[in-house]
Amino acid sequence: MAATEIISAFSYACDTISAKLSRGERVLLQDVSFSLSSGERLAVIGETGSGKTMLALSILGLLPANVRMQGGCIQMDGTALPTGKQLQTLRGDKLVYIPQNGAEFLLPARTVRKQLYDSLKKLSLPQKEFPQLAAEKLRLAGFDRPEDVLDKYSFQLSGGMAQRVTIALAACSRARLLIADEPTNGLDEAGRAQFFALLDSIFPDAAKLIITHDISVAARCDRVLVLCGGQMLETGTSAAVLSAPRHPYTKALLAAQVANGMQPSPILREGVSGCPFYARCPEADAGCLNGAMQKHTVGMSEWWCCHA
Amino acid sequence: MLEIKNCCKSFENQTVLQDVSLTIPGGSIIGVSGASGIGKSTLAKILCGVTAPDAGEIFLDGQLLVSEKSNYDRRWGLAIQMVYQQPYATLDPSQKIGAGLRELISYHRLTKNKQETEKLIADILAQMQLPSKILAHLPRQISGGEAQRVALARCLLLSPKLLILDEATSMLDVSTQANLLALVKAQMLPNGGSVLFISHDRALTDFYCDTVYAFDEDHRLKEVRA
């Protein structure tokens, strides 16, 4: 992509997202910010509970009732995203979400045809084009004979077919931002390559936010954002971050891959520092307990660490 | 040492295990891989006494565990423990983690009095690298990796000779998986225990196990990597 073509399609910044629990509050995400250009792929990686899904839900305005965003802003094309009803009209149109488990996400009481029509209605297209459009979207998602699927219910589809139906549903949109939550869970290497080819052919211009804990998926993205305990620890181009990780947490995530020898990262010490990885960090020292997180920058890569 | 001799099992007309023989020496990690539905879990269930084999014999340390003629030896079978795929489904959702561990200890009469029980629980939590506050939590309040370590702790309390991991890490992310598998290795092998590692992930079984077996299309078990 030529430098002049980059338009900031979407940017996200938040002070804190916190959950109100029965005994006080817990911070789920803190000081996360990034921007995405159209056509760009950003992978968000991190362990379970690092706040990946909360990030996606806060963009979509679908945070659970006890969780709220305390500050910061989410912008699209330079203006803040609306809230409430106005945001609802954007969901499924400009903002599109592909869930982790397609089979559970589809409505069991409506046929694939009805669900596709529901999504097409949002685009205010003439109703008589619906049958043709629906078939076309299914064909895009890899169904050679769409008529076989149209009148089926979600429970009559296999897991892989249901996932492709959710992609077809996502294709019924004018997506500017596409969020995919662990989209390739349970797929093998060939399936993953196919999934990304599909995304690129259906949504060439959309900014893509891919949530994953699979490093091979992150390697297919342009940039990577590493989350741990709700904080950004490292970000940069995926080539740089994945080949030469700077933060000990990113190193541990990479070393835990089977291909890299599956090294464990056990708890090494007690105590809490500014860094959420302190208890398991092999490089931490006594200074870390008092030190604040410092930002380091080299080229396009940025990382936050409490020791040098 | 566990010996499976000519084990067969079929459900109605569907053959699942065809003449399966396998020896698991003490202190080793044996991997079994294969496509889903091929019979991996059925083998594990037979070893745990959940289903009975149609034919064949299984010996643990030379003593008969189960055969087509004799029922599963429940007392002897306690030396075989299994960690299942779904961490939350293993734990009683209405029972706190601590209460579950205490119930297990008193049921199997592992300790003589309360102090011993509390000490045993503290020891096993330390081995599993779990914080002690987890005892007061319900299963839904802990993470998947923690739940799987609790399930592992419950198995290890009975000092098994064979630990079966049936897709036990497929729900976990890679770093949690690495931590759990390193723990299993450290807890089982030094005492001469062995591990039967069942997974559809060939790369993972190849890396983690000493010997890898796989089911072929005829539901026979073949050694694929020594």
Image: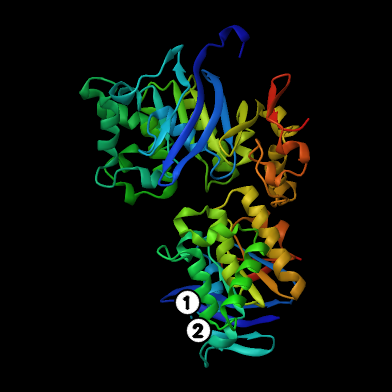
Assess whether mark 2 and mark 1 are in contact (beta carbons under 8 angstroms). yes
Q: Mark 1 lies on which chain?
A: B
Residue closer to the observer: A301 or B16:
A301
- Tell me where residue A182 appears, x and y as whole percent: 51, 40
Discs 1 and 2 carry the same chain letter: yes
Look at the image and tell me in which quarter the C terminus of chain A lies.
top right
- Tell me where residue A82 appears, x and y as whole percent: 36, 19
Left or right position of B32 against B102: right
Type of the residue with mark 2: Asp
- Local packing at callout 1 (Cα closer than 10 Å; few below 14, some 14-19, many 20+) is some
Residue closer to the observer: B177 or A202:
B177
Quadrant housing residue B80: bottom right
For image coordinates 63% across by 72% down, the residue present is: B119
Counting residues from the N terminus, which is met first, the one under dot 1 or under dot 2? 1
The residues tagged by marks 1 and 2 sit, at their Cα atoms, a distance apart of 7 Å
- Tell me where residue A191 appears, x and y as whole percent: 54, 42
Quick one: which residue is furthest to the bottom in this view?
Answer: B69
Which residue, given by chain and number where applicable, does mark 2 sit on? B54
Quick one: which residue is furthest to the top in this view?
Answer: A4
Left or right position of A125 against A297: left
For image coordinates 24% across by 46% down, the residue present is: A109
- Tell me where residue B189 appears, x and y as whole percent: 74, 70
Type of the residue with mark 1: Ser
Which residue, given by chain and number where applicable, does mark 1 sit on? B10
Q: What element carries label 2?
A: loop
